[in-house]
Image (cartoon, rainbow, N blue to C red):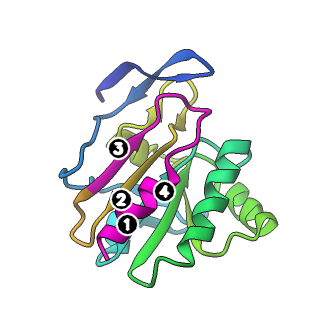
Amino acid sequence: MAQERTNAATFKGNPITLIGPELHVGDAAPDFKVSKNLLEEATLKDYAGKIKLISVVPSLDTGVCDAQTRRFNEEAAGLGDDVIVLTISADLPFAQERWCAAAGIDRVVTLSDHKEMSFGDAYGVHIKEFRLDMRSIFVVDKNDKITYVEYLKEMAEHPNYENAVAAVKELQ
């Protein structure tokens, strides 16, 4: 059974339980299996040799998640070809595609954790009560080492965009 971290975070002030380990700077980035679309899967190895900014959101159809994904889409333009920005949520791939088309998102790769919650379980962001992934940011270097982690304590708050982008730029 996966590790459960109670009182690790809240949703509108109410405690929620996160499943999986709490990762730290210096840890090897765990592998995961998520959906690119209905038929294709993606793993960490698919982005080998790239600096990875992994933006995790509960659902793209909410205000903070929408704003977070739009912000990293804008930031991606200035990060160069050696960086990939991944947005991971438990939304269905169809919903992610529809949302990206409507929002004009073209620099961020959206990946769905809905099938197995593999990413959520490996990175300690699977919210037990909602079967969603908790808002968080991970920066992973070209050698798949974690160089930046932000686990938000409150699901409805924004991450520190500036610190995440600065962590990516330090690797370039």
What x and y, as percent, mark residue 103? 77, 64
Query: The disc labelled 4 sits on which kind of residue?
Result: Glu
Residue type at the position of mark 1 = Val
Task: Judge whether residue 134 can be spotted in this image.
Answer: yes
Res. 145 image quadrant: bottom left
Mark 3, residues whose alpha carbon is within 10 Å: few (<14), some, or many (≥20)? many
Q: Looking at the image, which residue sits at the far right?
A: 102
Q: Name the image quarter holding residue 83.
A: bottom left
Per the model, the C-alpha gap separating discs 2 and 1 is 7 Å
Tag in front: 2 or 4? 4
Identity of the residue drawn at 26% across and 56% down: 146
Local crowd size for mark 2, using a 10 Å CA cut-off: few (<14), some (14–19), many (≥20): many
Magenta-drawn segment: 147-172
With respect to residue 49, does 144 lie above or below?
above
Residue beneath label 1, please? Answer: 168
Question: Considering only order in the chain, which callout, 1 or 2, is on the residue closer to the N terminus?
Answer: 2
Residue designated by label 2: 139
Residue at the spot 61% in from the left edge and 67% down from the top edge: 73
Identify residue type, mark 2: Val
The label shown at residue 123 is: 3
Disc 2/disc 4 C-alpha distance (Å) = 13 Å
Nearest to viewer (mark 3 / mark 1): 1
